[in-house]
Image (spheres, rainbow, N blue to C red):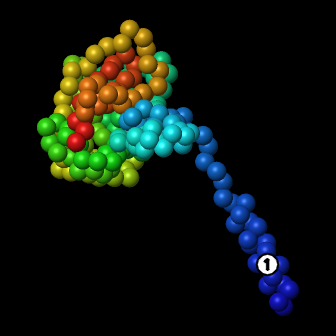
Amino acid sequence: MKRILLIVAIVLAGTTVNAQEFNKIDKSPMDRAYYPPGVAHDRIFEKDPVKKKALIPQIRVTYSRPAKRGRVVFGELLKYGQPWRVGANESTEILFMNDVVFAGKKIKAGRYTMIIIPTEKEWTLKLNTALDGWGNYGYDASLDIASLSVPVTYSDTEIENLSIVLYEASPKTVHLKIGWDKTIAEFPITLK
C-alpha cells in the first residue's frame, strides 16, 4: 500500500511540474530609465570608491516599450484627452530615491504611477499613488498628487518604440523626456 501511494505521489508531482508553462515573450518589452543615466550598470563596474559613491540612482522609471508598427499613435491608437499609462501592459512607475519637487509640489521619496493625458499641443503628466496596476484600467484621479502640463515638440525622425530618458537639464534639474512616433514631451523634476 505504501508503495502504491509513493508511486501515485510521484506521478502527481511530475504532472504538476510539467503543467507550469513559461509565458511567451511579450511584444512590448519592459525597460528602465535611470538618473543619472547608466548608473545601474556603471556603479557595479566602478573601481574608484569616491566615484562609486557618487553613482547612486536618484530616479528610476520602469515602463514597457510598445512599438508603433505603422500605426498612427496619437489621436488614433491613443485618443486625445484620454488617460494613457505611458507604455503598455503594467502601469508605468517612477521611483524617487529622495524627495523632489514636481509641478511646484514637494513629492516624498517613493514609488508613483505615471499617467499622461495627451492632446495635440501638450501633455499633462500626473503622479498617482495607486501602484502595481495593469494599464490605466483602475486609474482613479482622486489619487493624483501632482500634475504638470508641458507643450509637445516634434521629431524629424520617427521613434518606433516608446522611449524614456532622464537627463540633467541644469544643476539640480532633471528632465523626464518621453518620446514616441514623432511626439516628444519633457517634464522638469527638481532634486532636493
Point out the image quarter for the N terminus. Answer: bottom right
Q: Which residue is mark 1?
A: 8
Query: Quick check: 174 above or below 153?
Result: below
Query: Quick check: 128 above or below 17?
Result: above
Residue 21, x across and y down, in percent? 66, 54
Residue 109 seen anywhere in this rendered image of the structure: yes
Query: Quick check: 17 above or below 154?
Result: below
For image coordinates 38% across by 52% down, the residue present is 132
**Image position of 131 (left or right of 189):** right
For image coordinates 32% across by 21% down, the residue present is 184
SS at circle 1: helix
Residue 71 lies in quadrant? top left
For image coordinates 86% across by 86% down, the residue present is 3
Residue 129, x across and y down, in percent? 26, 51
Front residue of 117/12: it is 117
**Disc 1 residue type (three-letter):** Val
**Image position of 162 (left or right of 103):** right
For image coordinates 25% across by 39% down, the residue present is 191
Residue 174 lies in quadrant? top left
Residue 161, x across and y down, in percent? 46, 25
